[in-house]
Amino acid sequence: MNRKTAVEKSNSETTETIASEVESTQETVSGPEEQPKKEQLIYIGPNIPGGFLAQHTIFRNGVPKYLEEIRKRYPQVDTLIIPVAQLLEAQAQLQRKGTALQQAYQALSRKE
């Protein structure tokens, strides 16, 4: 193999190596637009006594830590915090007797 052919082969291999490294880097790096967004949640239960949690409170980045004590004291709260996208369906379930959402709502209503 002459020098010109060897240089061309080396350049070709280097170009292929760089191209594959760029592709693998593009696959592993995700920009802000590709990161999953946290779903908005809404509390559809009754107001909790003491003003700790009001009906139709919306949470943008998950359930806040300050509600941990309320969630321990009233476990039904977790049932009544739903994704905003499911609000219409959940409101219909609140009207039907025997559904989990309706039972959780009734249990919290009795505690007021």
Image (cartoon, helix red, strand yellow):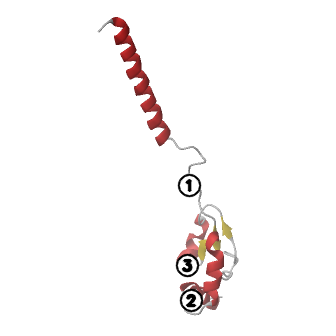
Q: Which of marks 3 and 1 is in front?
A: 1
Q: How far apart are marks 2 and 1 (CA)?
A: 32 Å
Give the amino acid type for the residue marked by disc 3 in the picture. Thr
Q: Earlier in the sequence, mark 2 or mark 1?
A: 1
Residue 71: % across, % down: 56, 75
- Quadrant in which the N terminus appears: top left
55 left or right of 22?
right
Q: What count of labels does the image hold?
A: 3
**Distance of label 3 from label 1 (alpha carbons):** 23 Å
The residue singled out by tag 1 in the image is 36
Above or below residue 24? Residue 3 is above
Q: Which residue is drawn at 70% across and 75% down?
A: 56
CB within 8 Å, label 3 to label 2: no
| Residue behind mark 3 | 79
Amino acid carrying label 1: it is Pro
Q: Are marks 3 and 1 in contact (CB under 8 Å)?
A: no
Residue at 59 percent of width and 78 percent of height: 80
Q: In which quarter of the image is residue 6?
A: top left
Question: How far apart, in angstroms, are the residues tagged by discs 3 and 2?
Answer: 10 Å
Of circles 2 and 1, the one toward us is 1
Q: Is mark 3 on a helix, strand or loop?
A: helix
Residue at the image position 69 percent from the left and 81 percent from the top: 47
SS at mark 2 in the image: helix
Circle 2 residue: 103
Q: Residues within 10 Å of mark 1 (few under 14, many from 20)?
A: few
Residue 45 visible within the image = no
